[in-house]
Image (cartoon, rainbow, N blue to C red):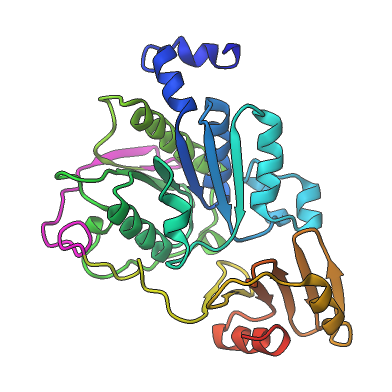
Amino acid sequence: MERYSRQEAFFGIGAEGQQKLLASRVCVIGLGALGSASANLLARAGIGFLRIIDRDYVELSNLQRQMLYREQDAREQTPKAAAAAELLGQINSEITIEPVIADVNSGNITGLIEDVDLVIDATDNVEIRLLINEACHALGKPWIYGGALASYGMTMNVLPGGDAPCYHCMFDEQVPDGETCATAGVLGTLTSIVASIQCTEAIKILTGSPDVRRTLLAFDLWNNEFDALEVTKNPDCPVCGRGEYQYYGKVSGSQSASLCGRDAVQIVPAQAAAVDFDEIAARWESCGKVTRKRFTVDLDTGAYGIKLFADGRAIVSGTSEEAKAKAVYAEYVGL
């Protein structure tokens, strides 16, 4: 236990708390700036089981703030979950790390979080957060929201049961729109701070600390502003008030989503299927440049690019129009 000696020496954890952490299971959804920082901190803290999930691959622009990736990962376009798992395994070989290269959606979220004790939100999409909120409410799982944009960060613990508010209680019936990291930018220092707060709260929750924060923490690092805001439970909230779900359990057909700040669209087929990379590569030979990689097979037609994953999911580049991307996918892969 020398690895965790400094953590055990802290009065809020101790030897008993460390054993609780080693017995804990945590799922980190999203391995961008917040997720890579969170996974790094949780692995070093000795969380016994870490399921780390991301749908995307490493790009050079990620390296400014996403701490688990190297230039080689960007050159090889390694899936983030695979690259993160490889490095985390070298940081702490005594815990179990399960990488999942997948899109989190209403069709698979139950299987991804039902066997964990806590979920860390490290996504960049409000709709996915609303799905996480509904799924965790249905399954009685605590989760920790985190967001970062420009120099502004927010985080809140969403705890099951009682009078605790859920994520949806922060809004009226409308989901907020706003800028993205691609348009407003983001400080790498900010994402590390948000993730550090999320992980500290995770450790409190997992060890049974009475000091778990009950407020929404919001801060602007550039302007030196910090606020702890009270969020009250809305008795008429469709999720925690009425138990009505807009996203959870609503699976229908293929799904598509434009990727933030990129001329690309992700396509998720209605049903995951094991892709025969050899068969696809042979079929694509007359369509453009085909590249076989460890986790994907890629096609460059000149006008569009397709990065096809083993479960049938693909990222279509060269367009931000979902309808066009679906048409490209149907033409070259088949829906």
Q: Quadrant of residue 322?
A: bottom right
Do we see residue 149 in this rendering? no
Which residue is painted at 50% across and 42% down in the image?
190
Residue 213: in magenta span: no
User: Is residue 102 depicted above or below 315 in this figure?
Assistant: above
Q: Quadrant of the C terminus?
A: bottom right
Q: Quadrant of residue 268?
A: bottom right
Q: Can you give x and y, in whole percent of width and height, for residue 73 in the image?
A: 76, 50
Which residue is painted at 76% across and 58% down in the image?
77
Do we see residue 218 in this rendering? yes
What kind of secondary structure does the magenta stretch mostly adopt? loop
In the foreground, 185 or 238 = 238
Q: Can you give x and y, in whole percent of width and height, for residue 328 in the image?
A: 67, 87
Locate residue 212 relative to residue 335 in the image: left or right: left
Q: Can you give x and y, in whole percent of width and height, for residue 213 in the image?
A: 28, 34
Which residue is painted at 72% across and 71% down in the image?
307
Locate residue 143 relative to residue 315 in the image: left or right: left
- The magenta segment is 219-243
Which residue is painted at 31% across and 59% down in the image?
134
| Residue at the far left in the pictured view | 235
Q: Quadrant of the N terminus?
A: top right
Residue 233: in magenta span: yes
Q: Can you give x and y, in whole percent of width and height, for residue 129 in the image?
A: 39, 58
User: Is residue 243 depicted above or below 289 in this figure?
Assistant: above
Locate residue 249 relative to residue 274 in the image: left or right: left
